Image (spheres, rainbow, N blue to C red):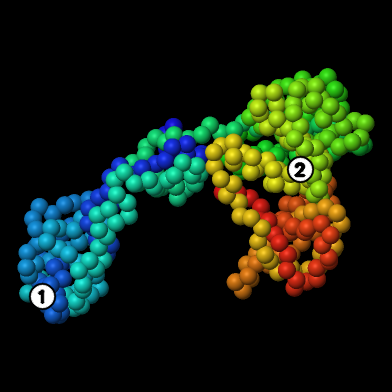
Amino acid sequence: MPLAEARFRTLAEAVRCDVDYPPFDRSVMDGYAVRAEDVRGAPVALEVVGELAAGTVSNRALRTGEAMQINTGAPLPDGADAVVRVEDTEADGAGGRVVIRKAVERGTFITRRAEYVRAGDVVLAAGSVLGPAQVGAAAAAGASRVTVYRQPQVAILSTGDELVEIDRRPEGGQIRNSNQHLLAALVRSAHAEAALLGTVGDDRVALRERIERGLSADVLCITGGASVGPLDLVPDVLRECGVTFHFQKMKIKPGRPIHFATGPSGGLVFALPGNPVSAFVGFELLVGPALAAVEGRPNNRPGLLRATLRGNIAATRDRRTYVPARGCVDGGGLLAEPVLWRGSGDPFGLAGANAMIMRPPGAAAVASGGEVSILLLGRI
């Protein structure tokens, strides 16, 4: 595809530079191209025999006793082997000459041809994600078109009679379907394509029809209906649709009733809890890394980091526990402070977090100033 359309796509083939880069010896300063031997006894006066702007090439070589005015990025003339900064020169009153006030060594303020890469060198490996810097490198390498992996399509389905769309005011026992928008944003942040299947109530026939549609995608994400209540229909309906379960519970908090399966055609299926923080944690731990693997790239999110706790945190029981937190750098070290949130159904506390404090099972309480492990949220 055209490079201009490939931002945040994943390279399926390496990008090689088609020329030496830089393609010529060039100046990295505004000043004068000289022969280092001529200015060894500075101050000395040299005859100015030309001017070189970026993009122009001298039609003559530099000879003993001569200098050429040169701009940043311009090719060095034959015979020159150094550049003197304009700040280290002054005009000669006689005209047509420049006084070099400071001696320089050979190679000063010059980038040599192929100093960055040689023609044919790999500049971006397969599996690289084309962020802004990588797009710039590909452009410099002459890759006007790149070969990338197809973006995975993720079908998103929300379940539950209690759900209403976000433009409606909930009544009675209703709540807004925020999970569909949360998951769509997470999918897009993982550089995948979100296909919204909407909301389906606690109706087995309607649920099966919607799940069968979703199984045609690379990945199906379902929220709600995955626990053990009488209206938690998702696991049974998934079985009816021919999926193979690999696990149906994780020893984590929040997010215990997480199911992972593969569909009849090999697509991935994640049934996540309906509470938004639980769904978020399940995506961060499982779905995001899986999407990276599907698209042929590494999971670039950093692993667990050590941080100093600001505030207090309770002991844990038998599950690995994730607590929304704010992480920041302070005095060269990482600090983590739990955000105010009221459990896995609270999307507002989660909105203030940029990290999760991870607590292993059976961990003792930690007071302010103690050390904790944090997982930074988001990905490249």
Q: Distance between the residues labelled 2 and 1?
A: 74 Å
User: Pointer 2: residues within 10 angstroms few (<14), some, or many (20+)?
Assistant: many
Quarter assignment of residue 368: bottom right
* Near-viewer residue (251 or 346): 251
- Residue 11 sits above or below residue 35 on the image: above
Location of the N terminus (image quadrant)? top left
Q: Residue at x 74, y 57 (%)?
A: 358
Q: Do we see residue 335 in this rendering?
A: yes
Task: Say which of marks 2 and 1 sits in front.
Answer: 2
Q: Nearer the viewer, residue 316 or 49?
A: 316
Q: Say which mark, if any, is on residue 341.
A: none
- Is residue 195 visible to us here? no
Instruction: Look at mark 1 in the image and give the residue it sits on.
Output: 45
Dot 1: element: strand
Give me the disc on residue 279. Answer: 2
Q: Position of residue 314 (x, y in %)?
A: 85, 63
Q: In this view, does 373 lie to the left or right of 45?
A: right
